[in-house]
Amino acid sequence: MEPKIRGAICMNAHPKGCAEETRRQIRWTQDYFSHHKASKKLERVLVIGASTGYGLASRIAAAFGYGAATIGVSFEKEPSEKRPATPGWYNTRTFDEEAKKAGIPALSFNGDAFSNEMRAKVGDALKSLGGPADLVIYSLASGVRTDPADGTLYRSALKPLGEVYKAKSVDFINGRLGEVEIAPATEEERRATVKVMGGEDWRLWIDYLGAQGLLAPDVKTVAYSYIGPEVTHAVYREGTIGSAKKDLEETAKGLNKELSASGGGAYVSVNKAVVTRASAVIPVVSLYISLLFKVMKQKGVHEGCIEQMVRLFSQRLYGSNEAMPVDTEGRIRIDDWEMREDIQKEVSSLWEKVDDENIDELADLAGYREDFLKIHGFSVPGVDYDAEVDFLNI
Ligand code: NAI
């Protein structure tokens, strides 16, 4: 079975490859915590957006690092005899199996996290697991959201605001450099993006669980954000998606005020740029990530999703410091190594120099491609890609 790639999207997923890649993250976590004892046991952790990328890695850290019973919510296509499922479906099956083997309770829901029905299901699931959540991770990346209040469908856009954005970009499959030009978003597109990726739905979750008595007094809730370098600001931080992320940050401040009254807290964690299904489709970001990987690998500080999330749990959320280390805006910064001055300086000097001739030498395109294939279950060591594939099983 071969990957079918169209643009920055891989249309299929290899069941065994996804399973093996999920198991690798579990093994990595178990190995880490066999050398670094977890500071506490977590009872129940809810991860919204739990099947791929940062959400899956968070769930693995919670379960296999902190012994938590986990509830995972995701939205994945199921397989048929003719078509494979989306990668997160296989990842979730594997997670559930491995958790069962380890004797760690896990409940997984496949459906729309933006709906009130899903909130009710998760509420019941928490009750069946014996009580409130210690931690709620919000890791959704979605292009659409139906507002449960009135049924309106909103679509997010990845566009700059105010001005046309032009920048270098790479087709990471054929390695060819080009230039992208993106017209600015309308105010309606900006607002729709805030509706989809801003903080409204996160607040609905926390309000619902709070009203049901399903948040532990010292509950922590964390949503993920990204800031990144100057070169991507116009299309990311200062674009439509950045507008949504700023809304998420405002939501964190409001929630934090309420939850801290009983010893809890709400945070945005600014994570490092990594290759996920969500980040692969953001123009310009793939070139930046390829250059960043080159520099971070050279300096020995490269991390993927699991390394980032284990560091977030062990050195921020449940670290040895009395107070959570945050920046002046109250955000957790686990993008600290990515944003180090020496690293950013080198990446921007490579950004200036990179051209069609030297791209293979200056950028880690091979590493980018490899990660992209792996998140779809391809190019995973130990998997026989010549063997017959059963889409219905892992
Ligand atoms: P991803 O595409 O790997 O994961 C998205 C998750 O959301 C999946 O589990 C998917 O099933 C779930 N999902 C999407 N729509 C849903 C719906 N309607 N109902 C239920 N589940 C749904 O994305 P990634 O990159 O892990 O993103 C997660 C968060 O991390 C996002 O907020 C993103 O902005 C943030 N982040 C990502 C970075 C990156 O470089 N990838 C960097 C920093 C932050």
Image (tube, rainbow, N blue to C red):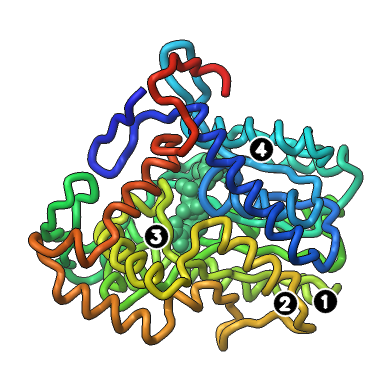
Q: Say which label, 1 or 4, has the lower sequence index.
A: 4
Determine whether the residue tagged by mark 2 lies in a helix, strand or loop.
Answer: helix
Of callouts 2 and 3, the N-terminal one: 3
Kind of residue at badge 2: Lys
Q: Quadrant of residue 153?
A: top left
Q: Which residue is mark 1?
A: 261
Disc 3 secondary structure class: helix
- Please identify, in this view, whether the residue under mark 1 or under mark 3 is nearer the observer: 1
Task: Return the residue at label 2.
Answer: 257
Residue nearest the viewer, comparing 174 with 138: 174
Nearer the N terminus, badge 4 or badge 3? 4
Crowding around mark 1 (Cα neighbors within 10 Å: few <14, some 14 to 19, many 20+) is few
Q: In the image, what residue type sits under mark 4?
A: Phe
In the image, 231 versus 101, the foreground residue is: 101
Q: What separation in Å lies between label 2 and label 1 (alpha carbons)?
A: 7 Å
Image location (x, y in percent) of residue 197 = 47, 56
- Asked if the residue under mark 1 is in contact with the one under mark 2, i.e. CB atoms within 8 Å, the reply is yes
Name the disc covering residue 162, or none.
none
What amino acid type should be assigned to the residue bearing mark 1? Ala
Q: Earlier in the sequence, mark 4 or mark 2?
A: 4
Q: CA distance from mark 4 to mark 3?
A: 36 Å
Give the image location of residue 203, x and y in percent.
Answer: 64, 59
Q: Going by the image, does 102 lie left or right of 381? A: right
Q: Is residue 47 left or right of residue 170?
A: right
Which is more foreground, mark 4 or mark 2?
4
Q: Position of residue 277 (x, y in %)?
A: 41, 46
Q: Which mark is residue 191?
A: 3
